[in-house]
Image: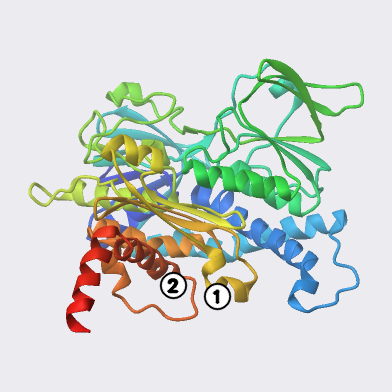
């Protein structure tokens, strides 16, 4: 006879861990089912390993700049044989963080952790094929949360599978640095890994179908990053469609692209596929319980309910935003809605969702791009402050980039930062947008000098100076001065 639970969570990544842990703390009887290891994509193939690799690449880049910071280093060249040590470090960092998501942590909260492959039998029953024994275990629950995450999408390109490739699931394990790396996809994953590998000595080519890399960013930001990466030696091919892939007689991997009506071949030693993600829904038997999905997502309403109202979905699999921080947010929404009733239920609010791309310099984004803002609001005001004007940026030797604030009237409708620690700086604008604060409101807070956060005040000062220099203010203030002279 199957056991009964208040909530069964399927998937032990960011969303699943938050949902299971939160529900258990409330006193619910919770089971968490995971196929492999707790921690999900973020820990093993995403955020943690990529940022660890990027840190090593930054060190390699800084070594080349040693004289700029007053050091004389005889030999700062990166050697290929060092690459295994770098990926070993990446795996070591994962091992250091892994205990944070250990089964014992969640079992102490009251979660029953089960490793195996689940599938729905009916709307309230699942069957788990246990990982170690293969035994079939039936389970029942009043509510379910599907948090199975996503996997790399592999496009149906002629010859790609036969030629061979890697994705973010393999790239952090390789021991030899490919001399020439071809990356399919110019999104965050492709650009972050591309810059890192270029700095570590590979010759990197990024192929992107859209007009620009980082196509979800403000165009000005995308163009800035294209120019910067090209200055570091990365070859960027935008508006390019991959036609086919094959190996030549030398065993090299050849990617044939069509760009501006012309055919071109890019030759490399390895191909990294980073063109998008697909939801992990295979073998769940969702059709059996009427949960609707497609190749991009499980469909949910504003309460994160699927088409089967007692079954929720959170994280990458829901297809809203594929970030760890939004997975955490969605899991919290699921806990509230699964156990409470109106008026205590809560709708998702994706009006203010920030994200960052951890290149150097970093790229951070919240709200609308300039193009989107003009389409939605018509007339907008753009405030732009270069890092070149920030004293701390000079002290750090990192003056590239800018902050771009988009105003619809007095309201901040978008903020885009490309520069040193942009991922940290964006949060002041996130809070302002969430609480409907104006740029003037932000400027009233005293900011420590010398910090990069003075950029916020500089943006407000820029807006104030525009107002003070306007003909209307100049005219009336001139008259005021004449009266009091």
Question: Is 415 or 17 nearer to us in this picture?
Answer: 415
Instruction: Answer whether residue 172 is visible to the viewer in this image.
Output: no
Badge 2 crowding class, 10 Å Cα cut-off, few under 14, some 14 to 19, many 20 or more, is many
Question: Residue at point 46% right, 33% down?
Answer: 280
Q: Where does label 2 land, which residue?
A: 454
Please say if the residues under marks 2 and 1 sit with CB atoms less than 8 Å apart.
yes
Q: Label for residue 251?
A: none
| Image-based side of 77 in relation to 347, left or right | right
Q: Is residue 77 above or below residue 482?
A: above
Work out which quarter of the rendered image holds the C terminus and state it. Answer: bottom left
Residue 180: quarter of image: top right
**Residue 481: where, in percent of width, then height?**
23, 77
**Element type at mark 1:** helix
Question: Is 157 or 110 nearer to us in this picture?
Answer: 157
| Image-based side of 292 in relation to 153, left or right | left
Instruction: Answer whether residue 153 is visible to the viewer in this image.
Output: yes
**Residue 323: where, in percent of width, then height?**
44, 48
Q: Where does label 1 land, which residue?
A: 392
Q: Earlier in the sequence, mark 2 or mark 1?
A: 1
**Residue 282: where, in percent of width, then height?**
46, 28
Question: Residue at point 74% right, 61% down?
Answer: 61
Q: Is residue 31 above or below residue 105?
A: above
């Amino acid at each position: 006879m199957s056991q009964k639970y208040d909530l069964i969570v399927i998937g032990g990544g960011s969303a699943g861990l938050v949902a299971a842990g939160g529900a258990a703390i409330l006193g619910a009887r919770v089971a968490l089912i995971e196929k492999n290891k707790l921690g999900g994509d973020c820990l093993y193939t995403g955020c943690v390993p990529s940022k660890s690799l990027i840190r090593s690449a930054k060190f390699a880049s800084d070594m080349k700049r040693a004289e700029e910071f007053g050091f004389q280093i005889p030999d700062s060249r990166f050697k290929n044989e060092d690459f295994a040590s770098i990926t070993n470090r990446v795996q070591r960092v994962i091992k250091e963080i892994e205990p944070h998501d250990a089964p014992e942590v969640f079992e102490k909260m009251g979660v029953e952790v089960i490793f195996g492959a689940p599938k729905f039998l009916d709307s309230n029953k699942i069957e788990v094929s246990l990982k170690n024994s293969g035994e079939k275990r039936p389970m029942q629950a009043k509510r379910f949360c599907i948090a199975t995450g996503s996997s790399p999408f592999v496009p149906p390109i002629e010859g790609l599978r036969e030629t061979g490739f890697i994705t973010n699931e393999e790239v952090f394990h390789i021991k030899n640095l490919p001399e020439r790396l071809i990356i399919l996809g110019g999104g965050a994953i492709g650009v972050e890994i591309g810059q890192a590998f270029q700095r570590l000595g590979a010759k990197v080519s990024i192929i992107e179908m859209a007009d620009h890399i980082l196509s979800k960013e403000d165009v000005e930001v995308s163009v800035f990053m294209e120019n910067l990466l090209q200055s570091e030696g990365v070859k960027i091919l935008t508006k390019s469609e991959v036609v086919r892939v094959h190996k030549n007689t030398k065993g090299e991997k050849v990617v044939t692209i069509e760009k501006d009506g012309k055919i071109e071949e890019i030759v490399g030693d390895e191909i990294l596929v980073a063109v998008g993600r697909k939801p992990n829904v295979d073998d769940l038997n969702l059709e059996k319980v009427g949960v609707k999905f497609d190749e991009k997502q499980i469909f949910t309403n504003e309460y994160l309910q699927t088409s089967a109202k007692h079954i929720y979905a959170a994280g990458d699999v829901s297809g809203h935003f594929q970030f760890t921080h939004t997975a955490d947010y969605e899991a919290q929404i699921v806990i509230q809605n699964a156990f409470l009733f109106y008026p205590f239920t809560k709708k998702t609010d994706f009006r203010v969702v920030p994200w960052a791309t951890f290149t150097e310099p970093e790229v951070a984004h919240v709200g609308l791009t300039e193009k989107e803002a003009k389409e939605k609001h018509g007339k907008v005001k753009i405030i732009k402050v270069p890092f070149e004007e920030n004293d701390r940026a000079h002290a750090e030797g990192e003056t590239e980039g800018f902050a771009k604030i988009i105003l619809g009237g007095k309201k901040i409708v978008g903020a885009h930062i490309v520069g040193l620690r942009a991922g940290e700086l964006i949060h002041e604008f996130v809070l302002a947008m969430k609480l409907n604060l104006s740029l003037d409101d932000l400027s009233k807070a005293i900011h420590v000098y010398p910090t990069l956060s003075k950029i916020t005040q500089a943006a407000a000062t820029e807006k104030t100076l525009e107002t003070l220099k306007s003909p209307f203010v100049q005219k009336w203030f001139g008259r005021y001065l004449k009266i009091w002279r």
